[in-house]
Amino acid sequence: MRAILLSLSILLFSWFGLNSPVLSQEKSEAEASEQVEPTDSVYSHPVIVDGEELFVVRGSTALPAIERAESVAERIISVAESSQAELVNVDIRPGELGRMIYADNIMITVTTASDAEFEEMDIVVLSELQAEAIRNTILMYRTNRTDEAFAQSTFTAFAWSAVFAIYCTILLLMRKRVSRLVARIVERRFHVVQAATQDVLQAKAVSNLVKFFVRVFLDVLLFTGFYYYLSFVLHSFPNTKPIAALLIRYVTDPILELMLGLVGYLPNLITIAIIVAVTRWIIKGVRLFFENLDQGTITLKNFEPHWVWPTYNLIRLSLVLTCAVICFPYIPGSNSAAFQGLTIMVGVMVSLGSNSVISNVLAGLFVLYKRSMNVGDRIRVGEHYGDVMQIRLMDTYLKSVKNELISIPNATLVSSEVINYSSKIDGKGLLLHTTVGIGYEEPRNKVEAMLIEAAHRTNGLKKSPAPFVLVTGLADFAMNYQINAFTTRGSSLPLILSDLHKHISDVFNENGVQIMTPSYEADTPELKIAETNWDGELAGADKA
């Protein structure tokens, strides 16, 4: 088999020698070196043999660097395969376009003045270094392909296989036992949390989640071990060494670049850490100030108590945003087009999707600081009636008189009429009123006196200013009388109004006056009034 490969290499070498004269090789490489000026856009590519980089060659648009590097590598391999000798004759000859490097009387490459200028070295020194690299590569290529080297590579591959087998056995045992052990420990520790949260946080669910992540971590370790095992086995044999170098480069090089990049950005990360630490200290100081303001240790004139924590949250948000703006230039990759494009995309998405959110937040600030209502006030917003429980940036919470929790968006509060029953205007209180319709046959003074008497009987209505009656309309069948009385108990309006209605009905029944509200079609022989005294027993109560 080795004789066949040797014969094929000799035939290829002979064909290459007949079709590529030395002079044409020298001119093409020299032209590739001379045509490109030493600027930042110079093309270059390393010469790679058996996965090892020897030196870098230059190229141009006429002869790209990758093609020139591959041509030099093919000549080195051709010379190495042409003989099994333990010595190689490498010499340097001056040429018309530079210094030509020969190996066993075969021209390998040309070192030109522009090559030396690109490497920032003397042309003589550079050609000597390249010649030495070529000599060592040829000898190493021949050495790695001897029977002894093949036996050593096979032994190395078996050694790596044994190590990987032990590695897999350990990981598989750990995958079963360690995951169970960790799950039991987590479940035992989280039983206390489960009891404290009243079974909201299940210890079994947490342990299963931890077990899953442990197994995923071990699977990643197993896959990583297989990847590097395959790379090391391939690296043991010279023919597959380039493939191994490629596999290692796909994983190791990105990790190394990431680590080197992290080290390079370490000063910026330290700067970001300092800015974040200073911001946290400022926020802690601001929080301490507002805690004292909430406890009354510090007082501010005309500063409402319910403003304390919303104001603190606004100041904290401003400090965090300021910190983010200051840290932005120090973030790794912040100057890249991809990072800037991502930032613009996120900004557009937020602006398009948060119109209602922003409007509610701005409305919340307006509601919070305009003093139209406070926590504990009883208000009416449209059909909603109740006490203000909490005012937030997005919405306001009411507790209705039926003990219902109502969430009203702050934008609705700003755009709707809000009636505050707890707000004090002139000290008189709220003017509670209700309307009844009484027939024209009843004297007006008598009706007014009955309504005022009903107001006097109602607890919660003030005697001074005195209640008064207004005639609000002359309807088809009755006059509409409106009783008005002041009260300072705004939180009890439904109960007071209910008591007022009860006393109006009682007073009118006591005086034999029927209430015509809402309306009626014809008079009946008997007055539509209730019995003054009720025996307290319901019909059919005994059967029940």
Image: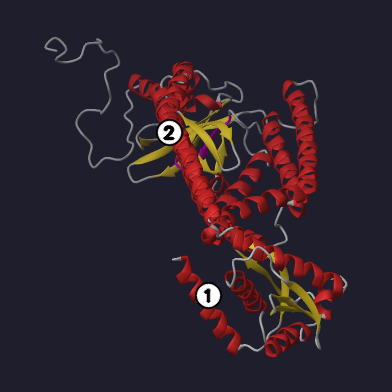
Q: Amino acid at mark 1?
A: Ser
Classify 189 as above or below 248: above
The disc, 1 or 2, on the residue closer to the chain's N-terminal end is: 1
Instruction: Identify residue type, mark 2.
Output: Thr
**Horizontal placement of 317 versus 405: left or right?**
right
How many other residues sit within 10 Å of disc 2, few (<14), some (14-19) or many (≥20)? few
Residue 242: quarter of image? bottom right
Judge from the rendering whether residue 273 lies leftward or rightward of residue 496; answer left or right. Answer: right
> Which of these two is toward me, 259 or 439?
259
Quadrant occupied by the N terminus:
bottom left
Say left or right for 223 vs 112: left
Q: Is residue 51 visible?
A: no
Helix, strand or loop for disc 1 = helix
- The structure residue drawn at horizontal position 47% and vertical position 20%, both measured from the top left corner, is 185
Q: What residue did someone put label 2 on? A: 169
Question: Picture quarter containing residue 271?
Answer: top right
**Residue farthest along the right direction in this orientation:** 122
Q: Which residue is mark 1?
A: 9
Judging depth in this view, the residue of 166 and 496 nearest the camera is 166
Rendered location of residue 480, percent (x, y): 41, 39
In the depicted structure, whether residue 147 falls above or below residue 31: above
Whether 11 is among the magenta residues is no
| Number of marks present in the image shown | 2
Instruction: Reply yes or no: does residue 379 show up in magenta.
Output: yes
